[in-house]
Amino acid sequence: MNHVTDLAQQPAVRAALSAAHDQLDAILEQIIRIQQIPSPTFAEVHRSAYMAEQFQAIAGDDLRVTRDALHNVYARLPGNDPGRPPLIVSAHLDTVFPAETDLATRRDGAMLYGPGIGDNSTGLGGLLWLGRTLVERQLSHAADIYLVANVGEEGLGDLRGMRAVVRKFDGRAVYLVVEGGLYGQLTHQAVGVRRYRVAVTAPGGHSWGGFGAASAIHVLGRLITAIDDLEVPAAPKTTYNVGIIEGGLSVNSIANFAQLWLDLRSEEPEALGRLVGQVQNLIRAANRQHAAQGSGVRITTEQVGDRPAGSIPRATPIVSHAEAALRAVGCADVRYIMSSTDANVPLSRGFPAVCLGLTHSGNSHRPDEYIDVTNLPAGLGQLLLTVLAAAG
């Protein structure tokens, strides 16, 4: 902690921390410009191109900017000690909102509203502020710093962007994941997530003339009820959720097809495995019953997501730096939370990683999502101090 405190007292660093307050309006304008570029999962290309342009503009040819085949963006800030492990500072490009979403924003005092404004336009804006601050203020660092804007964090993206990042740098790097919200909260323990598409096929028919034939929707409804009757432990926290249901042809048709999308989570891999097994047993039992009845019903499952669990000790330097940085910018209430973020990938492999947030936010994944800009300067200061401490 003393190292971070000493850093915060250096004149150049003090000036940078102060500038985060003075530049707040310009920072918010940049965040809104990012938010206005539609970036649904698997279609992040335009926001990726914008981030690459912005990174390049920070330092011209002195900053090496590349993009990979997935449209992850990498901006390398070279350090003065090539023997040090590189520091990867990442924020995800994608949002949960379809491309046609109305992205209008509005400001109400300290609250800034707009779809995806916190998750994760603010995180991306933080990367740009960090890069510009390091370059323009000539804040030296021993390790190479890579600013990474990555794809595929949300939903069915299944962390594919961060998986590629970790394949690129492996265990020789230290990872710092930036989210727009979650100020005052640190994650070094990753919640495991399994996601499935469960599909039901059935004979179907006319609602009157075919009455009595098996309906895929009715079968799906009984399966949802059975899942909802499962008992899951409160500790370790374990959850299930049917997020989407689809199917049927018309109001007067017996459905011949229906499907659901199922999200299963737990703080511990063993508990998650038990929950997965319980759901699989329900589906196997239903299939046996329908086969015995000759109903023509078939239930199939496809795994569509696997966000791995993992953790590192709280005493790991990158985690200690992040906590000390929060306290240095005036956050007395530092909380550690378990969550599912891009940090899952390095944490699952035991690599040093932590996820931090830049300000308070709310209504995440809703059109009326918002950030409270009050603590954004402090959150940016926390980011800068953590980076400087971790990069030497």
Image (cartoon, rainbow, N blue to C red):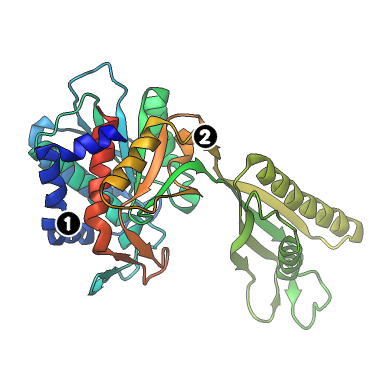
In the picture, the quarter occupied by the C terminus is top left
Q: Is residue 141 above or below residue 5?
A: above
Query: Could you tell me if residue 333 is visible in this image?
Result: yes
The disc label shown at residue 348, or none: 2
Q: Is residue 131 left or right of residue 255?
A: left
Q: Residue furthest bottom?
A: 208
Q: Amino acid at mark 1?
A: Ile
Question: Which residue is label 1 attached to?
Answer: 27
Label 2 neighbour load within 10 Å: few <14, some 14-19, many 20+? some
- Residue 140 place in picture, x, y as percent: 15, 29
Q: For mark 2, give the secondary structure.
A: helix
Q: Nearer the viewer, residue 189 or 223?
A: 189
Disc 2 to disc 1, C-alpha distance: 33 Å
Q: Residue furthest right?
A: 292
Residue positioned 29% across, 65% down in the render: 372
Residue positioned 35% across, 54% down in the render: 183
Q: Nearer the viewer, residue 364 or 392?
A: 392
Residue positioned 63% across, 73% down in the render: 249
Q: Residue furthest top?
A: 83
Q: Is residue 115 above or below residue 90?
A: below
